C-alpha cells in the first residue's frame, strides 16, 4: 500500500508535456509576456514578438555598433518593453555607450553606461534603473532625464514593473526587495527576502512578488498583506515566474532545470516539470502552459493542465 501511495504522489507532481519547441537565429536572452504577446530578446541584437499562439508578429535586428578599436560587433540588448504597439529598448551603442530607442520612431543617447532596465510608464514617460541602485524618470518627448532617486546602497540585480505600470519592484545584490510607487515617487516597502544576490523577480497584477536567488531559495511576497514565504531549491534559483492572478508561483528548483509550481493559497506543491534543460534563463507562467528558455536558441512550451 505504501509503495502505491508513493507512485501516486510522484505522478501527481510530475504531469507536464512538451507541446512546442521554437528555434531562433541566436541565443535567447530574455522572454517577457505583456498582455497576450511574448517579447523575446536575442543575443545578436534581435527582437521578436510572438502572439498568444506563438506566431511571429514582428522581427527586428538592430545594426551592428562600433567598438573603440573600430570593429563592428552586435548590439547588446539590456532590456525591452512593449506598450500597445510601441517597443522601448535599452541597448548598447557605439564606443561603449548606451541608448534608449522607441523602435522605428526615435532614439536617445544616454550619458551613463550603467543602465540595467528601462520601462514605459506611458507613451510619454519612461523609468530607468541603473546598476548603482538609482532610478530616473525619462521624458520620451524631449529626452530630458530627472535627477536620480536613490533606492539601494547595493547594486541592483533585477527590476520589474507592475502590469498597471504604477509600481516598480527592484531587487539587490544583497538579497533585498524594494517596492517603489511610481506615482508618489516613494518606497512603499523594503524586505530582506534572501541572504544573497537575487537573480530574478516577477510581479502579478495584484502585487504578489516572486524572487529567486543565489541562496538556493525562492520567495513569495504578498505586498498588500505583508505575507512572506520561502521555498528551498536544490540549486541556485536563476528563474522565477508568477501567474497574473498571483495564485501560482513557479521557480527553478534543481540543476537539471526542474520547475516547481507552488499553490500560493496553501503554499503546497501543485506540480513539478522535468525540463532536463539545466539552468533556465526565463520562465513564463501562463494559465495552461509554461514557456522556458535556457541560454540557447530555443524556447519550449510546456502543457501543465
Image (cartoon, helix red, strand yellow):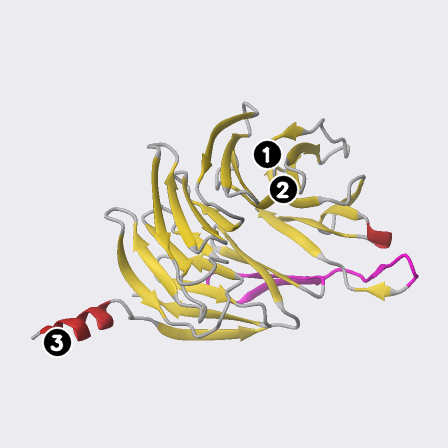
User: In the depicted view, which residue is nearer to us: 132 or 80?
Assistant: 132
Cα distance in 3D space between marks 3 and 1:
52 Å
| Label 2 close to label 1 by CB (< 8 Å) | yes
Residue 35 image position (x, y, % from top left): 48, 50
Q: Residues within 10 Å of mark 2 (few under 14, many from 20)?
A: some
Residue 283 image position (x, y, % from top left): 47, 60
| Label 2 close to label 3 by CB (< 8 Å) | no
Cα distance in 3D space between marks 2 and 1:
7 Å
Q: Quadrant of the C terminus?
A: bottom left
Q: Residues within 10 Å of mark 1 (few under 14, many from 20)?
A: many
Residue that appears at 43% across and 75% down: 276
User: In the depicted view, which residue is nearer to us: 267 or 90?
Assistant: 267
| Label 3 close to label 1 by CB (< 8 Å) | no
Would you say residue 168 is visible in this rendering? yes
For label 3, the SS is helix
User: In the depicted view, which residue is nearer to us: 56 or 168?
Assistant: 168
Residue 155, numbered label: 2
For label 1, the SS is loop
Residue 34 image position (x, y, % from top left): 51, 50
Q: Is residue 68 magenta?
A: yes
Residue 152, numbered label: 1
Report which residue position mark 3 lands on: 4
Amino acid at each position: 500500500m505504501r509503495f502505491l501511495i508513493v507512485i501516486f504522489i510522484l505522478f501527481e507532481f510530475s504531469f507536464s508535456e512538451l507541446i512546442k519547441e521554437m528555434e531562433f537565429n541566436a541565443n535567447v536572452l530574455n522572454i517577457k509576456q505583456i498582455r497576450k504577446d511574448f517579447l523575446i530578446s536575442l543575443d545578436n541584437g534581435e527582437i521578436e514578438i510572438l502572439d498568444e499562439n506563438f506566431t511571429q508578429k514582428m522581427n527586428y535586428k538592430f545594426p551592428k555598433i562600433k567598438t573603440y578599436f573600430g570593429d563592428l560587433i552586435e548590439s547588446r540588448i539590456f532590456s525591452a518593453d512593449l506598450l500597445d504597439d510601441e517597443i522601448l529598448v535599452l541597448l548598447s551603442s557605439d564606443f561603449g555607450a548606451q541608448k534608449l530607442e522607441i523602435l522605428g520612431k526615435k532614439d536617445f543617447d544616454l550619458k551613463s553606461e550603467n543602465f540595467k532596465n528601462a520601462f514605459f510608464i506611458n507613451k510619454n514617460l519612461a523609468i530607468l534603473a541603473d546598476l548603482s541602485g538609482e532610478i530616473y524618470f525619462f521624458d520620451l518627448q524631449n529626452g530630458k532625464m530627472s535627477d536620480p532617486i536613490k533606492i539601494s546602497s547595493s547594486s541592483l540585480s533585477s527590476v520589474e514593473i507592475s502590469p498597471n505600470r504604477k509600481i516598480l519592484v527592484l531587487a539587490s545584490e544583497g538579497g533585498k526587495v524594494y517596492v517603489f510607487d511610481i506615482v508618489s515617487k516613494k518606497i512603499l516597502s523594503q524586505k530582506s527576502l534572501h541572504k544573497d544576490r537575487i537573480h530574478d523577480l516577477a510581479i502579478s497584477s495584484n502585487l504578489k512578488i516572486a524572487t529567486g536567488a543565489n541562496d538556493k531559495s525562492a520567495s513569495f511576497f504578498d505586498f498588500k498583506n505583508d505575507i512572506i514565504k520561502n521555498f528551498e531549491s536544490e540549486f541556485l534559483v536563476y528563474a522565477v515566474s508568477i501567474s497574473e492572478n498571483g495564485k501560482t508561483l513557479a521557480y527553478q528548483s534543481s540543476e537539471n532545470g526542474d520547475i516547481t509550481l507552488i499553490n500560493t493559497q496553501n503554499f503546497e506543491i501543485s506540480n513539478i516539470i522535468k525540463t532536463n534543460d539545466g539552468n533556465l534563463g526565463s520562465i513564463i507562467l501562463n494559465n495552461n502552459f509554461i514557456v522556458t528558455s535556457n541560454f540557447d536558441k530555443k524556447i519550449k512550451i510546456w502543457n501543465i493542465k
